[in-house]
Amino acid sequence: MKGVPDGLSGNWAMKKKLTAWVLAIMIICCTTVAFPEAASPAEKTQHKIEPITLTVYISTLEANLDMVFYLMDGVTDLLWVDLDSACGLLSGLGQVWRNDKGFELSYAAEGKTITLTRENSFHMTFDFEENRISCLDYNMFLHDSTDTSALDLLYMKGYNAAGEAELFQRNQNATFDRLGSDVEFCLSDYSIEMVFQDGCGYIPLQTLGDLILTPAFGLNTFYNGKAVFIANASLFGNETEGYTPLGEYYYSAEPCERSEALAEFGYNELCLALDCLYGLWEIHEIDSFSNLFWQLGSVTPLKDRNASEADKALSFFINCYLDDLHSGFNDRSWMNAEKTVPAYFGTMYNKYLLHLQEYSNIRNRILGEVPVYTEVGNTAYITFDSFDVTQEGGAYYDSLKNGTLPNDTIGEIIRAHAAIYREGSPIENVVIDLSNNGGGHVDAALFLLGWVLGDAPFCVKDTFTGALSTASYRADTNLDRVFDERDVLTDKRLFCLISPVSFSCGNLVPAVFKYSQQVTLLGRTSGGGSCTILPMSTAWGTMFQISSQRRMSFFKNGSFYDIDQGVDPDIYLTKIENFYDREKLTEYINNLF
C-alpha cells in the first residue's frame, strides 16, 4: 500500500497543498455528481433511492467539499455512491492525495455494466446483472503510475519536479514482476448488493472504500450521520494523546444503535474486506472469515445492533486471535456510547512486551542513554530503535545546506556516513544495532539497505492476487545526487545485531542482509513480521489495522520466501549483556578475522 508506513506513523506524507486538493476534487466531482432523472414508465423502480448532499472531509477539516450520496430504502445510517461520482473522487485522490500526476480514471457504461479504466488500460468492471466486480489485474489497477514495479512500496518518487535525483534510485535492470491472477469479487457470496436503476449504478460507500480507497491510498471511509470522512486512524488522533479537530468532529455525533440493515451489511462487508486484504490467512489456516467468526462464536456480537458489543467482539478477535502484532484495534465507532473499548492483549503481544522490556532494561543498565552513532576503537555502532522519516525527499538536501538535518533515520544515516568516511577515520567495522527495533517506515528501511548493500533488493508478494515483485534501490547517502560507490559501506566489515524485539522492518532489514551474504548477523532470532500495515474501518465506523496482503519476502533460487517467522543469526549470543558490552563485542568482532 503506497504511502502507508509500517506502523501508521509517517505524517510527513500528509503535508499536502490543501487548497489545490479541494479545487482539484471540486472541479472533478462537480462535473459528475448528479441525481438521475425520474424513471420512465417502462422502467420499474425496485428501490427507493434518496439523494443526500454531505460535506466530505479528506484528512483534515480544511480539505472538504460537498458531494451527493444516496440513502437506499429508508435506511439512514448506510450510504451509497454512484460510480460516476466515485470515478471523479478517485481521480482527485490519485492526482492530489497521492501526488500521482499521471493518475487518470475514466468512466464508461454499457447496459448494466460500468467500467472504470486507468490510464495504463487496466480496468475494474462492475457487472450489475451478475452482482460482481472483476479486475484483469487488481494490482495494476491500483498502481501508482510512477512505480517501477507493480508492488512498489517505496513512497518517495526518487526525483523532484526538475528531474533531479532525490535520495532513491530504482534500478530498472534489477526489477521484475510476475502479475497476479484475475480477480473477481462475487458480492452475492457475501449478501452484498449493487444497485442499477434509472441508468445509474450504485454501490455501498464502504465497499468502494474497502476495495479501492484503502488498498490504493491507505484511506478509509466513515459516515457519522453528519458528514463523510476520508481518512484513517492516524488522522483522527486518539483519546489518550488527544483527538485532532477531525477526530473531535467525527466523535461529536450522538451515539446510537445500528439499524438492522447496517448491522447485517457491516458484518458481511467486514468478511469481504478481510478475505481479500488480510495477508496471513494462509498461515492462520483461515479458509474464510465468515467460517472463522462462526467457529469462534463471534457472529452474534458482531451483528449486535449495539455498536459497543460489535466493537468489543472485533477488538478481542483482532488482538487475541489474530495476535500478529501488526493487526490491532485502534478506536471505537462513533455509534459506541462507551468511550473506551476493553483492552485485550494476546499471547504474542504479551511475549513481545516482555522481550522489549528485558532487552531495554539490560541495555539501559549497561549503556544508559544510547546515542544513535558512537565509536568504540575501530568499530562504529549505529543504533536504530525504529525507522522514521520526517520529510519529503528533496527536503533533506535543503536541510543539509541549512545545517538542520533532522534526527530521523535518514538524517542519522547521512551523518553516520560522513563520520565513517571523514579524513583520518579509524573505522573498519560497522555494526547496525536493530536489537530494539520494532519497525517503522519502509522508506527509511530501504535507505539503510541501500547504504549498506549498494543495490538493495526488495521482494513483495500479494497474497490476494498472487502477484510477485522484486525491485532494487540505491540510496544517495552523501546527498550529491549521484548514486555510486561513495554512497555505500563497500570497504567495511559489516554486522547487524538482532533480537526477538527486531520486528517488521526491523526484521526485513536483517532478512535482506542474510540473503546478501555481505552482513554478519549477531544475536538471537528476530521477531518476525512480514506484512505492511493496512488501516481499516468498519461500515459502522470502527478503526482498526491488519497485516495487509502485501507480504515482504526474500528471493532465493527463483523462489519467494516468507520472513514472518524471523531470521536466525549467523553468530548466536547467549547472554543479552553481550549485546551491549561494546568493548567486549568490539574485541570479539576483531578476533573473527
Image: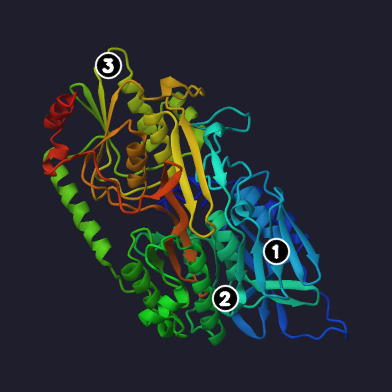
Q: Which of marks 2 and 1 is in front?
A: 1
The one nearer the camera, 526 or 217, is 526
User: Amino acid under label 2?
Assistant: Gly
Please identify the quarter of the rendering in which residue 88 is found.
bottom right
**What residue does disc 3 label?**
425
Cβ–Cβ below 8 Å for labels 2 and 1? no
Q: What residue type is labelled 1?
A: Thr
Q: What residue type is labelled 3?
A: Ser
Confirm or deny contact between disc 3 and disc 2 (CB under 8 A).
no
Dot 2 corresponds to which residue? 225
Q: Can residue 478 be seen in this view?
A: yes
**At numbered mark 3, what does the secondary structure look like: helix, strand or loop?**
loop
Question: On residue 125, which mark appears?
Answer: 1
Task: Report the side of 306 relative to 231 (left or right).
Answer: left
Q: Earlier in the sequence, mark 3 or mark 2?
A: 2
* Mark pair 3, 2: CA separation: 63 Å
Q: Residues within 10 Å of mark 1 (few under 14, many from 20)?
A: some
Q: Where is residue 356 in the image (x, y as percent from the top left)?
A: 22, 52
Give coordinates of residue 47: x percent, y percent: 72, 84
